[in-house]
Every structure is written in C-alpha cells, then in structure tokens.
Amino acid sequence: MDRGSVPTGDLTGLLHAWNHGDPEALDRLAPLLQAELRVLARRILMREQARNGWQATELVHEAYLRLLGWNKTVRWQNRAHFFSTTATMMRRVLVDAARTRKAAKRDLGLRAPLESFELAAPEPAVDVVAIGDALTALAAMAPRASQVVELRFYGGFSVEETAEALGVSPRTVNNDWNTARAWLQQQLAERDNDGR
C-alpha cells in the first residue's frame, strides 16, 4: 500500500477534525482515502478468500457506513490507527456476512438431490467466522498482539510501520507477530479437530 499518497500529518489533522465534528473534514478525507481503502479491501478479500461475491468497493462502502456510526465513540490517533480500525471493521463485515449465510443454510434445510449440484475442484476452505472468533479471543487476551495482526496481515503494514504506529520497537512487533500467528494456528487447528 502506498502510504505516501496522503501526507501523514494531513491525514491525522483531518481525522482529528472529523473527531471534533467538522463535516468538511470527512468530505476532504473520503476522496483522499478511497484508493487506499480499496487496496486494503482487496487485500482482505484475497487473504480471507471470500468467494462470496464481495467486491472491494462494496466492502469499503459497508465498512464506511459502520465507521460513520462508530466515529462518535472512537478518537482517531493517527493514520495507522485509522487503517487498523478500518481493517478490523472490514473483517467484521465479512464475518457477519458469513454468519448470516451459515444461518440461512441451516434455516433452508437444503434438501436437494446430489445430482442437482455442480461439483467443482475443491479449494482450501477458509472459515472466515473461525478466524474472526480467534482474532476476537486474541484481542481479549493480548490486545497489542491482536493489533499487530490487524496492521500486518490486514493492513499490509511493514514491521517498522507497525512498530511506529504502536509506539514499540520492531523487535517487539516481531515477537508479538510470531506469538500471535502460532496462537491463531493452534486455535484454528483445535477448532478443525473439534469438527466445528
């Protein structure tokens, strides 16, 4: 992601102005961030392998609507905080959509003859809900490690950018990243073994 397109100071100033209720700040922010948010959305869709018809623009729009309501409770610190929060919001949109689809399948009962289904080569399944649940559990247990995952994996931040955003050393980011990845892999493996 090209973080040089909008100077960090300008973005942080606009985020602070938006926090303080300046409607012009949001009008100026939206076009500045549109391209970067689409890149973030594409990255999230690719990483979560969300083959459910979502387009990057739709995901940005849905997350944007949620952020508008959320802006009353969050105080944007800087660009990294904004992108981390937006990545989290986009992930939640996908998790909510996946839960809704699963509930709809259960409600329908899906009683159709096997011959009526077209079978395609199987793709490795990525359970968006399982990943979302695991990240929520990680955030409750180790908030900074969860932020590192959000920034690195979903936001595409480098180790150095993540360290700067969180106010820690790159070594701390690497430690949190390695610990979080191992913990998440274990949680997802246990969930698979339990057959959930």
Image (spheres, rainbow, N blue to C red):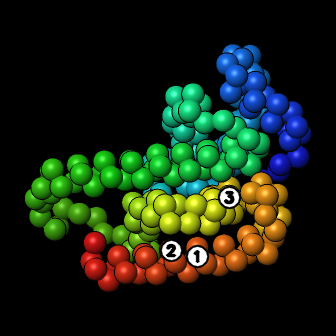
The x, y position of residue 40, in whole percent, is 66, 50
Q: Quadrant of residue 77?
A: top right
Task: Report the amino acid beneath label 1.
Answer: Arg
Identify the secondary structure beneath mark 3.
helix
Q: Quadrant of residue 144?
A: bottom right
Q: Quadrant of residue 160?
A: bottom right
Please name the residue shown 33% across and 52% down the image: 99
Mark pair 3, 2: CA separation: 15 Å
The C terminus lies in quadrant: bottom left
Residue assigned mark 3: 151
Task: Report the amino acid beneath label 3.
Answer: Leu
Disc 3 crowd rating (10 Å Cα; few below 14, some 14-19, many 20+) is many
The x, y position of residue 183, in whole percent, is 52, 78
Please name the residue shown 24% across and 51% down the image: 103
Residue assigned mark 1: 181
**Considering only vertical position in the picture, is 167 above or below 172?**
above
**Considering only vertical position in the picture, is 7 above or below 125?**
above
